[in-house]
Amino acid sequence: MKHRTEEELIGYRDGEAKERVEIAGHLKECAECREELARIEAVFGALDAMPIPDPGEDYGERVWQRIAPRLGEKKTRWWESLFVPQRLAALGGMVALVILAFVAGRWTKTPIPKSDQADAAKVRERVLVVAVGEHLGRTEMVLMELENAPPQKGQKAIHILETQRRAEDLVEENRLYRQTALKEGDQAMASTLDELERVLLDIANSPEELTPAAFETIRNRIEAQGLLFKVRVVKQGLDERNANPDAKPAENKARGTERKKV
Amino acid sequence: MAEEVAVSDAIAVERTLAGDRDAYRVLVERHSRTVYRMAYRMMGNAHDAEDVVQESFLRAYQKLKQFAGNANFGTWVYRIAANYAIDRIRQRNADEGRREGPSKPGENSLEVDPLSQVQDMSPSPERLAGSAQLAERMEAALAELSPAERTAIVMRHWDGCGIEEIAAVLKSNSNATKNTVFRAVQKLRRALMPFLEGKEARAMGTEG
C-alpha cells in the first residue's frame, strides 16, 4: 500500500486536500498514516498552546489615546475641513454673534421704550453668557487634553496637530468674546479671555511635532497661570448667571479665589 | 451578532467620514484586541505588535474613503495590519541581515538535520512537560520562517482565514499560497521534532 505524503496529510488536516475522500478512506486502513497524521496534529497542538499576553480590557482605549493626536494627519481638501463639527460650531457661534451685533445695533439706533431696551439688553447678555459658556467649555477640553498628556518616557516628539486645529478655532472665537466682554464692561471676563487667547495662540502657532521640552513649557504656562482653574470658575459663574439671569455677575470671583490659592 | 457588529461598524465608518472623530474611536476600541493578537503572533513581541496595531489604525483612518463599505471593517483593518506586519518583518530581517553579515549555508536554518539536535535537546519527560520550553522552541521556529510563511501560518491556523484572503496579503495565487502554508507547517514540524516526536519524520511517500 502506498502511503500518503506529508503534503497530502497536512493538506488533509488543513481542509485543503484535493482527494479528501480518498485520503479519509486510506486513513481508515493505514495505521502508519494515522500515526503520521497524529504527529502532524501535534504541531498544530503546539501552535495552539502558544501563550499570548493579554493586552488588557482597556487596550482599545489605550490605542485610541496613542493615535488620536495623530489622526489630524488625514489629508483633506481645505473646504472639507470647514465641515468638521468643531469648526461648524465655531463658525455657528461667530455667525450668531454677528447677527446679534447687527440686531443689537439696529435696536439702539431706533428710539424704543426704555423697558424694551432693558429687555433687549437682557436677551443680548443671555445669548452672550450661553455662547461664552460653551466657548469656555471647549477651551477647557483643549487645556485638559494638554494637561493630561505628559510625554511618555523616551518619547521624542509629541503630535498636537488635532489640538492645534481646535486651538486655532478657539482663538477666533475668543477674540470676538473678549472684545464683546470689554464693550460690555465685564473686565474680569475680558482679562481671563485675554490670558486664554495668548496661550491658545501659543498652542496654535507651535510646530505640530513638539519636543518634550517645548510641550512642557506650554503645560507649565497653563499651570503657572492657573488657567484651567480660572476657566472653570468663570464658566461656573456664567452657568449660574444662565440659570438665574437676574443675579449679578460673579465678577472677580476667579481672581479672589486665585489670590487665596497663591 | 457578527452582522450587528458589521452594521454598527458601517455606521461608525460613515460618521467618521462625515467628520465625527469619536466614531472612529468606537472602531478602534472594538477591533484593537483582535488586530493585536495577530500582530503579536506575526512580530513575536509586544512592542512591535503595539506598533503594528497603532500604525494600522492610523493607515485605516487615512484610507477610510477607499473602504468601499461592502466589506467588514474588522476584516479590512486586519488585512491592513497583516500587510504592514509582513513589511515590518521583511524590514527587520533585512536590518538583522546587515548587522550580522552573510551567514554560512545551513547556519540558523531549520533544514539542519534534526538528529543532530537530539543530543543537546533530547526531550526527557521533564522537558516535554515544560510547555514553556516548547513555546520557546516554537517561537524560535516561527522566527526562522520566511515572512510569507509566517503570515500564512498565522492567518491560516490562528485566525482561520481563507486561502484567497491570505493570497491577497501575500500578493500571490491560491496554489502558491497553499504551498506556502504547507512549507510553514513542514518547517515547524522539523524544528519541533526533537520535542514532539524524538525522531525524524517518516520519509515522504514511502511504500508501506
Image (cartoon, rainbow, N blue to C red):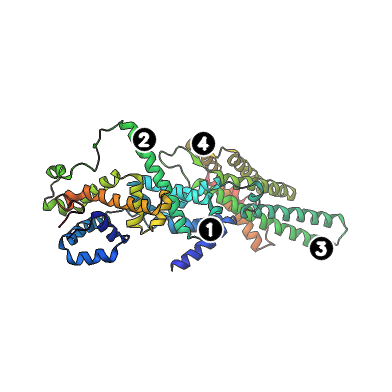
Instruction: Assign a secondary structure to mark 1.
Output: helix
**Where A213 sits versus A63, above or below?**
above
Q: In this view, does A131 lie to the left or right of A60?
A: right
Say whether residue A62 is visible: no
Badge 4 and badge 3 in a common chain: yes
Q: Which amino acid does label 4 sit on?
A: Ala
Q: Which of A228 and B174 is in front in this view?
A: B174
Real-space Cα distance between discs 3 and 1?
46 Å
Contact check, label 3 and label 2, Cβ < 8 Å: no
Q: Which chain carries label 2?
A: B
The residue carrying pointer 2 sits among few (fewer than 14), some (14 to 19) or many (20 or more) residues within 10 Å by Cα, namely: few
Q: Which amino acid does label 1 sit on?
A: Ala
Q: Nearer the viewer, residue B45 or B167?
A: B167
Q: What residue type is labelled 2?
A: Asp
Would you name the residue on which mark 1 appears? B23
Would you name the residue on which mark 2 appears? B95
Q: Which residue is drawn at 29% across and 62% down?
A: A19
**Of tags 3 and 1, which is closer to the observer?**
1
Q: Which residue is drawn at 65% across and 53% down?
A: A83
Q: In this view, does A26 lie to the left or right of A204?
A: left
Q: Residue B204, position in %: x, y?
A: 21, 52
Badge 3 and badge 2 in a common chain: no
**Of tags 4 and 3, which is closer to the observer?**
4
Q: Which residue is drawn at 30% across and 32% down?
A: B100
Question: Between disc 4 and disc 3, whose residue precedes?
Answer: 3
Badge 1 and badge 2 in a common chain: yes
Would you name the residue on which mark 4 appears? A214
Which disc, if any, is residue A116? 3
Where is the N terminus of chain B found, in terms of image quarters?
A: bottom left
